[in-house]
Image (cartoon, rainbow, N blue to C red):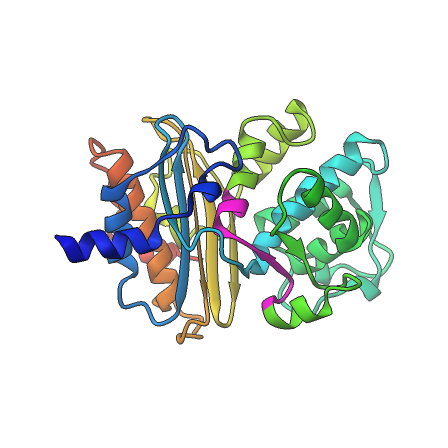
Amino acid sequence: MLTGIIVLACYLPPAHAQNSHNSTSNRIDPVLTKKVLQAIDGFKGEVGVYVRHLKSGKTVMIRADELFPTASMIKVPILLTAFQKIQEGELDYHGEQTYRDSLLYAGEDILGSFKDGEKIKLSKVIMLMITTSDNTASLWCQKLVGTGTAINEWLQAHGFSQTRVNSRTPGREADREKFGWGQTTPREMAELLVMIREGRAVSLDASEEMYRTLTRIYWNGEALSQIPPFIQAASKQGAVNRSRSEVVLVNAPSGDYVFCVITKNQEDESWQYDNAGYVLLRNISRLLWDYFEPKSKWQPAPGAKKWAK
């Protein structure tokens, strides 16, 4: 028992770290923390986890304030800054944008198949950025809102001091070499979703539209696969060779809960369904659903694996 207490204590945040982002009424849940620690035990790599049940305040923080790569989760701050520019009249949500070949980011993205000069509404570019995680659409949005510099200014102004865009952003090259497109902490990325859910991002109406967008996700094979399909969840996924990540806010019957799991320096760099990072995301998501919704009898349907994307 003493050993378990010592291990748990090593993962608890310092007192000052528990007071940011509306967490004054939150409390570390030792039972859930132990379960999450057991889930990540033996993982070959580094793992950060942040969990918060918004109604009860039950919280898990495991390296939750440590910097990790965002991969495609950086598209959440891009989304927020885009809506800020739309709210201020600098961009038109329903206005048409002209696609140029110079915008292409090599890959399998939908927008990259467009011909030079084709028109597309900004609302659809944003949808592609979030729903399908289209990198060409995302980098275009990043450029339209004023580059990573404008996004980082928005983050700083709203109390997110650790989350930053690095790619194509002056002065961030050293950080880009270390973290890639962006960097964040599990807590900050999760609390960005909470800010949107609670209507505190940009404006109430903008928050609602952003939240709707974040609930329409194509990539549902990891954390989302362990949540009943009839339960709404807002999310964003991220993946690069040595890091897999997901941030999810679940509108559960017992009350909303948010979680963010990020890995870094993981040994398994494969892109298969059973990649260790993907397995971890599914396991923690399932653990949280069962913990917060113990009366639920839902299980993924037999054969569900073949639909994973």
**Picture coordinates of residue 283 (x, y %)?**
30, 54
Can residue 259 be seen from the camera position used here? yes
Asked if residue 183 is among those painted magenta in the image, a careful observer would answer yes
Q: Tell me which residue sits at (65%, 44%) in the image.
A: 127
* Number of numbered discs on residues: 0
Asked if residue 88 is among those painted magenta in the image, a careful observer would answer no
Q: 111 above or below 104?
A: above
> Toward which corner of the image does residue 256 lie, by quadrant?
top left
Which residue range is magenta in the image? 179-190
Query: Toward the viewer: 120 or 196?
Result: 196
Can residue 304 be seen from the camera position used here? no
**Picture coordinates of residue 106 (x, y %)?**
69, 70
Q: 176 above or below 212?
A: below
Q: Tell me which residue sits at (55%, 62%) in the image.
A: 69
**Picture coordinates of residue 221 (x, y %)?**
41, 54
305 displayed left or right of 65: left
Query: Toward the viewer: 124 or 210?
Result: 210
Query: Toward the viewer: 262 or 230?
Result: 262
Quarter of the picture holding the C terminus? bottom left
281 displayed left or right of 139: left
